[in-house]
Image (tube, rainbow, N blue to C red):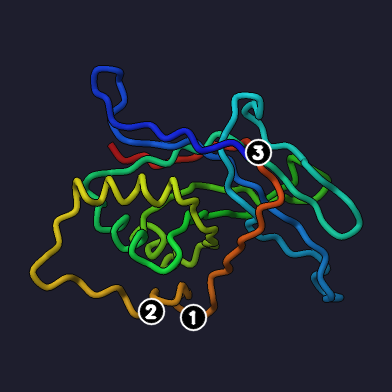
């Protein structure tokens, strides 16, 4: 698997914030449920590559599962959210979080497909999305991403005299109704893929 290409802030080169470009792999798997025979979930996050293009595409399809690649997500680190990255990198398993939604009408295939909306490394972002009852899932980051995030935290995060406690309702990555946020460590694919995303913060 290729490494993630990590970009540091460089105003002279027009790079305002550190960022990494990733692609999201979504999985559709058959389950033993007569009313809902298929289930969508986040499968992986991989380095984005130019060869992936700009559109989502089907990677795999058989009787038991499908995998879709969604390229082109830019994950930036914002100085005003340094605490969010601190709370992530100091957990037992630092991770990427992905918000995804189902298509309202089928556009990519005969049936609606799960579409990633955005990817973040911020613990605060993930908590807000869970509180808004969005579908949020996570995959562990690589060591290189964790070290990159830690370097950013070391530079920009200042510990308060009495550090804010990690929200208890989010500590175990559950939503407001107590449903667990799923975690996947599946690394079947080593590419990356299409879609769009990122944050609109300036």
Is disc 3 in contact with disc 2, using a CB cutoff of under 8 Å?
A: no
Camera-side mark, 1 or 2:
2
Which sits earlier in the primary sequence, circle 1 or circle 2? 2
Is disc 1 in contact with disc 2, using a CB cutoff of under 8 Å?
A: no
In the foreground, 53 or 93: 93
Relative height, residue 163 to residue 15 (above, below): below
Location of the N terminus by quadrant is top right
**Residue found 54% across the figure and 78% down from its top:** 179
Which label sits on residue 191?
Answer: 3
In the foreground, 201 or 25: 25
At label 2, counting other C-alpha atoms closer than 10 Å, the crowd grade (few under 14, some 14-19, many 20 or more) is some
Q: Estimate the x, y position of residue 200 in percent, counting from the top left.
A: 36, 39
At label 3, counting other C-alpha atoms closer than 10 Å, the crowd grade (few under 14, some 14-19, many 20 or more) is many
Q: Secondary structure at mark 1?
A: loop
Write down the residue under mark 2. 169
Q: Is residue 194 left or right of residue 82?
A: right
The answer for how far apart the CA atoms under marks 3 and 2 are is 34 Å
Q: Is residue 114 left or right of residue 127?
A: right
Q: Estimate the x, y position of residue 53 in percent, counting from the top left.
A: 64, 26
Which sits earlier in the primary sequence, circle 3 or circle 1? 1
Relative height, residue 80 to residue 9 (above, below): below
Single out the residue that lies furthest toward the top. Answer: 12
Write down the residue under mark 1. 177
At label 1, counting other C-alpha atoms closer than 10 Å, the crowd grade (few under 14, some 14-19, many 20 or more) is few
Location of the C terminus by quadrant is top left
The answer for how far apart the CA atoms under marks 1 and 2 are is 9 Å
Q: Is residue 149 left or right of residue 154?
A: right
**Residue found 74% across the figure and 51% down from its top:** 112
Q: Secondary structure at mark 3?
A: loop
Q: Secondary structure at mark 2?
A: helix
């Amino acid at each position: 698997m290729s490494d993630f290409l990590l970009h540091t802030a460089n105003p002279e080169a027009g790079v305002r914030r550190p960022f990494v470009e990733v692609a999201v792999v979504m999985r559709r798997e058959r389950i033993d449920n007569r009313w809902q025979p298929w289930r969508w979930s986040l499968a992986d996050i991989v380095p984005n590559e130019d060869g992936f293009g700009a559109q989502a595409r089907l990677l795999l399809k058989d009787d038991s599962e499908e995998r879709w690649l969604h390229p082109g997500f830019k994950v930036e680190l914002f100085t005003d959210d340094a605490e969010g990255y601190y709370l992530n990198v100091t957990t037992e398993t630092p991770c990427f979080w992905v918000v995804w939604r189902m298509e309202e009408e089928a556009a990519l295939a005969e049936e609606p497909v799960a579409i990633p909306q955005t990817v973040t490394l911020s613990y605060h972002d993930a908590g807000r999305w869970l509180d808004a009852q969005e579908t949020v899932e996570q995959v562990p980051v690589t060591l290189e991403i964790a070290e990159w995030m830690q370097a950013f935290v070391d530079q920009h995060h200042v510990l308060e005299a009495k550090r804010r406690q990690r929200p208890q309702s989010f500590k175990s990555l559950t939503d407001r109704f107590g449903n667990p946020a799923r975690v996947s460590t599946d690394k079947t694919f080593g590419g990356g893929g299409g879609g769009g995303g990122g944050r609109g913060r300036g």
